[in-house]
Every structure is written in C-alpha cells, then in structure tokens.
Image (spheres, grey):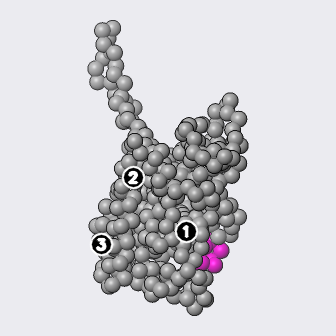
Amino acid sequence: MLIALPISELTPGMFVDSVTKQQEGLNSIKIKTSGLVRNQAIIKRLVTEGVLELLIDFTKGDAAVPDKYRPKAAVVKEPVTSSSKAKPPAVKPAITLEQEFAKASISFEQHNRKLQALYGDITTGLSVNLNLIDEMANDIVSSVFRNTSAMTILTRIKDKHSYNWRHMVNCAIFTAVFAKYLGYKEEAVQQLAMGALLHDLGQAKLPQGIISRPSKLTSSEMDIIKRHVAQGLGLVKGEKGITPLILDMIVNHHERLDGSGYPRGITAEKLSRPARIMAIVDVYDALTADRPHQEGDEPINALRYLLAHKELFDAELVQHFIKCLGVHPVGTIVKLTNERLALVLEGNKLNPIKPKVKLFYNAKHGHHVTPKDLDLSEPDQSIKIVSSIKPHDYQINLARLLKEHLLN
C-alpha cells in the first residue's frame, strides 16, 4: 500500500518510496533514494533538507499503516428491519475498452499535435507552456484510471516522422499505466506523467538536423544529444508546479544502475524509484517505436532486452513492468496456432501469455474474417499465441484496424 505522508508523521520502520514535496529553493534533486527509515537521524536529515511529504510503501517497511489512513468500515445509518433491506454501496460503473477508446483516440491525436506545436515553439526560443503539459498529463492519467488499455493500445501506432513528441506522449501513457499497477495514488501518478512528458523536451533546444538524422550518429553527435538532459532541466527548473520528483525524472532517466549512464554516471544507490521507472519506460518505447534511423522492434524483444540487462535496469521493476504490460501488450497483433491473426485487447496478470484477443484475419489464405473475441486463458481453450507480428508484414494499417474494431 502506497500512502503519501507529511514528514511530521514519518517514523522509523517506514519504507520511503520517493519524496513527493520539498521546499522550493533547495537543491531539488538532492533527495532521490528510496529505502527503509532506520532511525531518527535519517528523519532529522530529511527535515533539514526541506522534505515536506514522502510516498511510503507499507508493503516493504516494518511499520503498520496509521489508523487514520486505514479504510473505514461502512456504517449503516438506518437499522435493517424485516420490511427494509440495507442498500449495497453504489458501485462506479466500469468504462469498457470501446467506450474509453472513443475518447482516448481523439485525446491521443490532440496531445501529439499540441506537443508537436510546443516542441516547435521551444525550438524557436519560446518558453514551455507548463499549463498545457499539466492538462495533458491530467487527461492521460484520468483515461488510464478509467480504463488501462485504451490509451496503451494507441501507443502501438507508429510514425517515425513524429517520433520526438510521440515518444514523450507514449512514455507518459506507459508511466501512468505502470505507476497505477504499482499502486501509486492518482495524484502521484499525475506527477510521474508530467515528468514523462517533459523528460526529453530538452531535445528541442538541440540542432534538429542531428535529432532527425536517418543514419547512425557519430560519437561527437552523441555527445551533443546528451546535452538534452541539461537543456530540459534548464527549461523547467524553478517554474511553478515543477516538483523534485519531476526534476529527478528529467535529470536521471539516462542514468544506469552500474554507473554507465549519463550525464553524471551515478550508480544504483543514488537512483530513485521514479528515475528507475522512467529509465525502463524510456528505453522500452524507444526500442519499440519507429525512429528516423531504425524500425521499431516487437514488444517481446524490448522486454527481453530490459530483462537481460540487470546491471542497467532495476530487475524487480522490470519484472513488474512485464507483468503490467504482458508478454504481448494490448494493441499488439499476434499469430495464433489456428493460422489466424488477432489483436490483443486485454492483458492477463496471472498468465501473461494468455490475454484476451480479437481474431480478425486468416493468415493462411490472406483475408479478413468475421471478428471473434477469444479469452486464451479459458480452461477449454486450446488456441495459443505462436508469435507477435508486424502489421506491415500483412499489409495491415493498424490505425484503421483499431478504429474498425474498437469504435462503435
């Protein structure tokens, strides 16, 4: 259970996930490690360094959840008699994938256009419109909390000519989905999504000919690219609404556990959980997206890469990320043992290789078929996934396919 607590309520035995509020004017990226509060000396140091609020993970520490933060039992205000029955509590109706996708598809394109315009403004020397970033983050997080799959599916639509801003939107979506899965409250997820939207914005201050080059960059050009971290920090530091958590994500998303990252080459003990989350999400989307110099890889290969590099990425978080997205994430097209193609619509947290899919294409004979929903986890279901496939291998327009099958 993750709960945001004021520093005054912090006690030894609690496990700090991250700092969520810190006094302005202090070195805002100084507090970035997570860990167990072992004694009062640690608390005094946090107070001295201006920490106001922390996110506490009660599943990892030794301290019990304070009574005031425990869920209260429902109170029956009216006695139940033979002539009256207690009414069950009102349940918020679930938003179906199709219902949320209709909203999400419109918002997704709007976000990409707005971020593209903002990127252009910064390239010409204008300042960042943080109100716009906040609105976008709020919209993405709200959508994810209504239905996790809708926005996530849209991240599978690729366009190498708009990678710069689509990457930031995609990262915000993945970060929101992952943080929700990890148990972060919506307010904290909002900050994480803002950090993801801003993490690469410093690239707008670099020579765009290098950013959009369709060939591999030289070492000197890579040194120029690395400057985007400092440029991004300069764009937002000191601005209203920019929290230490957001700055941490911008500054440290290219750092690695073994110290091989940049810009400072810091190691695991100095990397916070939000920075580690951002690193995983950033690399995952970069590997799976079409970019000017490379074609995107399939999600399963990107997940294998993250899993294989335990020296670079937090292994525990990578395992959670795989369980969160699934081996075949929503929006992926998969080939089945019955020679049909299907669209993954909903993951399966208990058995990631058996998601819910929508069958739509006969791969053997090369034609579309009547759509059919399949739950591959059902006990009597013998059909399995053989592999994921790239839409263009079968001349499939993914954007059109999504609209045909998910929009009423």
Q: What amino acid is found at the position of numbered circle 1 in the picture?
A: Asp
First reached walking from the N terminus: tag 3 or tag 1:
3
Number of callouts: 3
Task: Give the quarter of the image for residue 276.
Answer: bottom right
Query: Residue beneath label 1, please?
Result: 290
Query: Residue beneath label 3, please?
Result: 129
In this rendering, the answer to whether 12 lies above or below 27 is above
Disc 1 vs disc 2: Cβ atoms closer than 8 Å?
no
> Could you tell me how far apart the alpha carbons at marks 1 and 2 are, in whole angstroms?
21 Å
The magenta segment: 256-262
In this rendering, the answer to whether 129 lies above or below 109 is below
Q: Which mark is residue 104?
A: 2
Please tell me whether the stretch drawn in magenta is mainly helix, strand or loop: loop
Residue closer to the observer: 226 or 264: 226
Q: What amino acid is found at the position of numbered circle 2 in the picture?
A: Ala
Assign a secondary structure to mark 1: loop
Assign a secondary structure to mark 3: loop
Residue closer to the observer: 258 or 372: 372
Check if residue 261 falls in the magenta segment: yes
Residue 109 at x, y = what percent?
A: 38, 61
Q: Which mark is residue 313?
A: none
Check if residue 178 falls in the magenta segment: no
